[in-house]
Amino acid sequence: MPKRLGPYGTGPRPHGLYSPAFEHDACGVGFVARIDGRAGRDIVDGALSVLENIDHRGAVGAEPTTGDGAGILTQVPDQLMRRVFGAQGVAVPQAGHYAVGLAFLPQGSHSAAAAMDEIEEIVADEGLEVIGWRTPPTHPDPIGPMARAAMPVMRQLMIADPARRLAGLDLDRRAYRVVKRALHEADTYFCSLSARTLVYKGMLTTAQLLPFFADLAQPDYETAIALVHSRFSTNTFPSWPLAQPFSLMAHNGEINTVKGNRNWLSARESQMRSELIGPIGPLTPICSAGESDSASFNSVLELIHLAGRSLPQAVLMMIPQAWENHTEMDPKVREFYEYQDCVTEAWDGPAAVAFTDGSLIGATLDRNGLRPGRYWVTEDGLVVMASEAGVLDIPQAKVVRKGRLEPGRIFLVDTALGRIVENHEVKAALAAQAPYGEWVRDQAVYLDNLPPREHIDYPTTS
């Protein structure tokens, strides 16, 4: 099918000295996680409290009830999904063996219905089956007229492998194909479609997110990880799809190299191959027209991760430490960075990025280090990270560790291992995965080492 323009807001057109390309400002990001991986309703409540406490990092329009974006990313709440889809007579597969996500369909009943039909065709074409559709209960009355006018038709989709063999990350790779094709072929944006994580977000204020999405108030919405974001328009005007979090991350700041990053990716798309993802052609462009810098970052992070690299490795590839002149860096880690520098370009900010795959959750600063990030760890294994301290009311006597994000360093919580993995440990483990230094020495070609070219004097004409 022919590819269409994705459903991102376009904002005003350039006129005079004004260009929408120069739109940028700050925003707020935070997460709450239980180190031992035990899911609970309290993590959702804590994350929503963090979100309301970073309300000042978002913005509203001329209407104080129209926000420019807020959202939450959690593990898939299996009990909730099993209950609400089961109430419709749907036989929900085993946890991890289904992917579920919120779709923003085109406005208008005919357009939405047509898009759902197209998506079902895409799902079947990708060797999956539709388990069921659901209309998530929403309460739009309190939100402003501008946000309501732009509000898409919302449906939740559940899909699975007909043989029930694909699960977790393997199922996510197949679901990724559905997401990208739905964007290009059916004008439909999926906030997420995953066996591991679930996103609720919109063109809302921080206080509107919970009352708008009734699912978020349900007692059986349980998770061990919750990532939230309060958005002040970054590199684009507000729209429902461009609210954060995205499927893997949330971002505070701006990517100042984003134009070059997008261009380099576009130049390579025709040569991309992945045995794990399958043919890339139907999924391109990876970065769609109208995306914000954060959305483009997520698009590339998703591609790198699903193509076979761990999420921490994908993050460190895109946001490298300042390694070239770091004399005290472990040589193996420097070789890791030097090799990755040949694979992809850095996405430089100033930027603070929080990320999760549903098991790991963490955050990092780019090498400029010009965005804030503070974290607390409590004696009972709760981790709170946000753009500033004090976002959750925790007695100081319970706090056993405090810290801040540092340039080029990664803060990582592994809920499967049940511990915080330190920066040096993450990088040492990644550097030991392959002989990166040997590959660079054997394969890299440096311009300074090329033989001199013969100079030819061309005749000039008068």
Image (cartoon, rainbow, N blue to C red):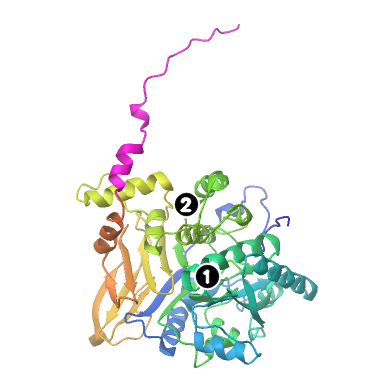
Is the residue marked by circle 2 packed among few (<14), some (14-19), or many (20+) residues within 10 Å? some
- Which of the two discs, 1 and 2, sits closer to the camera? 1
Q: Secondary structure at mark 2?
A: loop
442 is within the stretch colored magenta: yes
Q: Main secondary structure of the magenta part?
A: loop
| Mark linked to residue 256 | 2
- Residue 1 screen position, x and y as percent: 73, 57
Which span is picked out in magenta? 435-462
> Where does the C terminus fall, quadrant-wise?
top right
Residue situated in front as seen by the camera: 5 or 338: 338
- Alpha carbon of mark 1 to alpha carbon of mark 2: how far? 34 Å
Q: Amino acid at mark 2?
A: Asn
Residue plotted at (74% across, 71% down)? 117
Where residue 321 appears, as percent x and y from the top left, is 32, 53
Q: Does the magenta segment cover residue 83?
A: no
- 331, 164: nearer the viewer: 164
Name the image quarter holding residue 440.
Answer: top left
Counting from the top left corner in percent of width and height, residue 300 is at 50, 57
> Residue 24, percent across and down?
52, 59
Q: Which residue is mark 1?
A: 171
Q: Residue at x 56, y 8 (%)?
A: 460
Residue drawn at 30 percent across, 56 percent down: 433
